Image (cartoon, rainbow, N blue to C red):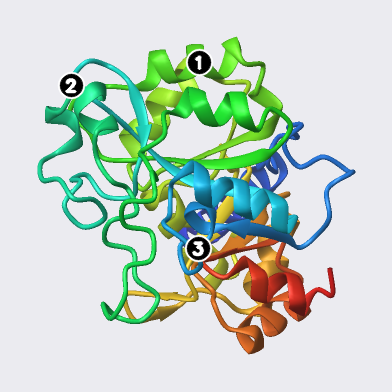
């Protein structure tokens, strides 16, 4: 007697599930997460923007002196093709200038006071104004910190920075020290094609897909093209960070690095859950929590 149609459908579905589960692959190993690093990683957001002007050499040097594990920063491309570090697309919020970075030359960017608008007390004082804090180039950071691990976020730009960025990474032999992040899936795809030896975290749509998969207990079917998930505690009304999420991520060989956490209690909770790193404006607080 022939099987009924629905029996065939069930068998096919079961076979498909088995096939997808067997063929799913965890994240490929890359040298960025080396065995000699301390975990959880203290990742200084913009070099520690809660302590000093972010995305500046001043911040990165102070964070390095503090003993952080990773320097986090944001890269843009100027009108004349230089790669510079700043969080925003425009210089208005953090400097004494105005305008889009991509419409300015490196020489114009270098004239700006990058400590101009940083304040520790909601505008009562501006202790870094006129102190010679400038906007750094990506190459200056590579030259100053050749042995430091870095998370570098590719920001929104019209011109592509992928080729010159990859060439710069290779020039300074930073392939194993760099983790590339971006919210933009197209930019991440472009970078991976150009610089496949450099580790990347998940872009926006990739993050969403994995979070939803984990919520549906389907993480085991996911084959990530990235090495880490850099995520907030919640997004769009959905709680992202749970202990189960950390376990699901680890089951696929993925590191979990949470942003942007600035209080000791939340840091300790996430550490207890087994996160691999915490991105923070206050690396000094996390160093204290870890007893370093």
Where, quadrant-wise, is the N terminus in this rendering? bottom right
Is residue 214 rendered to the left or right of residue 25? Answer: left
Q: Residues within 10 Å of mark 2 (few under 14, many from 20)?
A: some
* Residue 68 higher or lower than 267, as above or below: above
In this rendered view, identify the residue nearer to me: 22 or 238. Answer: 238
Which circle's residue, 1 or 3, is located before the other in the chain? 1
Q: Kindly indicate the quadrant of the structure image that contains residue 80.
A: top left
Give percent across and percent down for residue 60. Answer: 56, 47
Looking at this rendering, what residue extends furthest in the front direction? 130
In this rendered view, identify the residue nearer to me: 77 or 47. Answer: 47
Q: Residues within 10 Å of mark 3 (few under 14, many from 20)?
A: many
Q: Residue at x 18, y 45 (%)?
A: 90
> Which secondary structure lies at badge 2?
loop
Give percent across and percent down for residue 149. Answer: 68, 40
Q: Are marks 1 and 3 in contact (CB under 8 Å)?
A: no
Q: Residues within 10 Å of mark 1 (few under 14, many from 20)?
A: some
Q: CA distance from mark 1 to mark 3?
A: 27 Å
Q: Which mark is residue 79?
A: 2
Give percent across and percent down for residue 74. Answer: 41, 43
Q: Nearer the viewer, mark 1 or mark 3?
A: 1
> Which secondary structure lies at badge 1?
helix
Is residue 198 rendered to the left or right of residue 134? Answer: right
Q: Are marks 2 and 1 in contact (CB under 8 Å)?
A: no
Q: Nearer the viewer, mark 2 or mark 3?
A: 2
Q: Residue at x 68, y 49 (%)?
A: 64
Which circle's residue, 2 or 3, is located before the other in the chain? 2
State the residue position of label 1. Answer: 168
Q: Is residue 3 visible?
A: no
Q: Residue at x 28, y 81 (%)?
A: 124
Is residue 31 rendered to the left or right of residue 172? Answer: right
Q: Which mark is residue 231?
A: 3
């Amino acid at each position: 007697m022939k099987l009924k149609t629905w029996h065939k459908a069930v068998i096919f579905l079961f076979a498909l599930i088995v096939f997808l589960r067997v063929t799913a692959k965890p994240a490929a190993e890359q040298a960025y997460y080396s065995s000699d690093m301390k975990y959880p990683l203290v990742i200084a957001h913009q070099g520690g923007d809660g302590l000093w002007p972010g995305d500046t050499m001043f911040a990165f040097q102070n964070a390095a002196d503090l003993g952080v594990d990773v320097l986090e920063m944001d890269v843009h491309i100027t009108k004349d093709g230089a790669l510079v570090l700043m969080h925003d697309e425009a210089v208005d919020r953090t400097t004494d200038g105005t305008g889009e970075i991509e419409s300015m030359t490196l020489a114009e960017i270098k004239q700006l006071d990058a400590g101009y608008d940083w304040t520790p007390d909601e505008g009562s004082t501006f202790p870094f104004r006129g102190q010679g804090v400038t906007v750094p180039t990506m190459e200056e950071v590579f030259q100053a910190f050749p042995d430091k691990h870095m998370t570098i976020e590719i920001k929104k730009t019209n011109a592509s920075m992928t080729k010159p960025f990859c060439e710069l990474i290779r020039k300074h032999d930073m392939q194993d020290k760099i983790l590339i992040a971006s919210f933009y899936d197209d930019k991440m795809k472009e970078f991976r094609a150009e610089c496949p030896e450099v580790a990347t975290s998940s872009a926006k749509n990739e993050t969403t897909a994995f979070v939803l998969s984990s919520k549906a207990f389907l993480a085991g079917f996911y084959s990530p093209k990235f090495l880490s998930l850099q995520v907030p505690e919640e997004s769009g009304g959905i709680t992202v960070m749970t202990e189960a999420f950390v376990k699901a991520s680890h089951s696929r060989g993925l590191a979990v690095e949470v942003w942007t956490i600035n209080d000791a209690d939340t840091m300790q909770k996430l550490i207890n859950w087994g996160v691999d790193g915490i991105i923070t404006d206050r690396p000094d607080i996390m160093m204290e929590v870890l007893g370093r």
